[in-house]
Image (cartoon, rainbow, N blue to C red):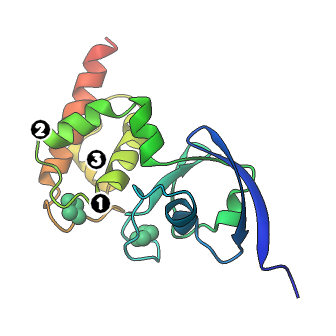
Amino acid sequence: MSERFHDVALTVNGEPVRERVDARKTLVDFLREDLSLTGSHVGCEHGVCGACTVRVDGVVVRGCLMLAVQCDGARVETIEGVADSGAIADLQEAFIARNALQCGYCTPGMLLTAQELLAGGGVPSRETIRTYLSGNYCRCTGYQAIVDAVETVAQARAKAVR
Ligand code: FES
Ligand code: FES
């Protein structure tokens, strides 16, 4: 019978992490339960809602669809690390200014996904913003304010690089 527990070594928000994890444990459960990084949320647990969004090796992924053991050797970034870096300070401010959050459950995933879109540069159309964020569900805001916030930041960043 194969081993149920495995040793993994990865970096999380720039810090080296070594843990022994259950082969069945998802990345989001590992982050929340083992590392106390509770900014990534658990919603549907089957890849639909986007609440569990994190970055692995620079790419936004569903933390509920990856196993922690799959992240051996990977670079994982959560909303805590990305927020602390200051990289999304403008997005966070715009979400507050535009009332783009209410309960906040979707917000970490929304911010990471929006940041990935805006990292491509330029000012995406509202339609493009909607499409890019379409895998992140929000039960509170009706999305309009979220699109407003992302569009505002895209315009401000584009202006800043001119
Ligand atoms: S909890 Fe992962 S997509 Fe919903
Ligand atoms: S702010 Fe409540 S789910 Fe989006």
Mark 2 crowd level (few <14, some 14–19, many ≥20, 10 Å Cα): few
Q: Where does residue 64 sit, x and y in percent of width and height?
A: 51, 69
The image quadrant where one finds the N terminus is bottom right
Dot 1 or dot 2: first in sequence order is 2
List the residue tagged with mark 2.
Answer: 97
Q: Is residue 137 left or right of residue 5?
A: left
Judge from the rendering whether residue 51 lies leftward or rightward of residue 155; answer left or right.
Answer: right
Tag 3 residue: 129
Q: Residue at x 49, y 62 (%)?
A: 32
Residue 14: % across, % down = 60, 37
The amino acid beneath tag 1 is Cys
- Marks 2/3 in contact by CB < 8 Å: the verdict is no
Q: Are marks 1 and 2 in contact (CB under 8 Å)?
A: no
Marks 1/2: CA distance?
17 Å
Foreground mark, 2 or 3, reads 2
State the SS at label 3.
helix
**Mark number displayed over residue 106:** 1
| Viewer-closest of 48 and 17 | 17
Disc 1 packing (10 Å; few <14; some 14–19; many ≥20): many
Residue 30 in the image: above or below residue 90: below
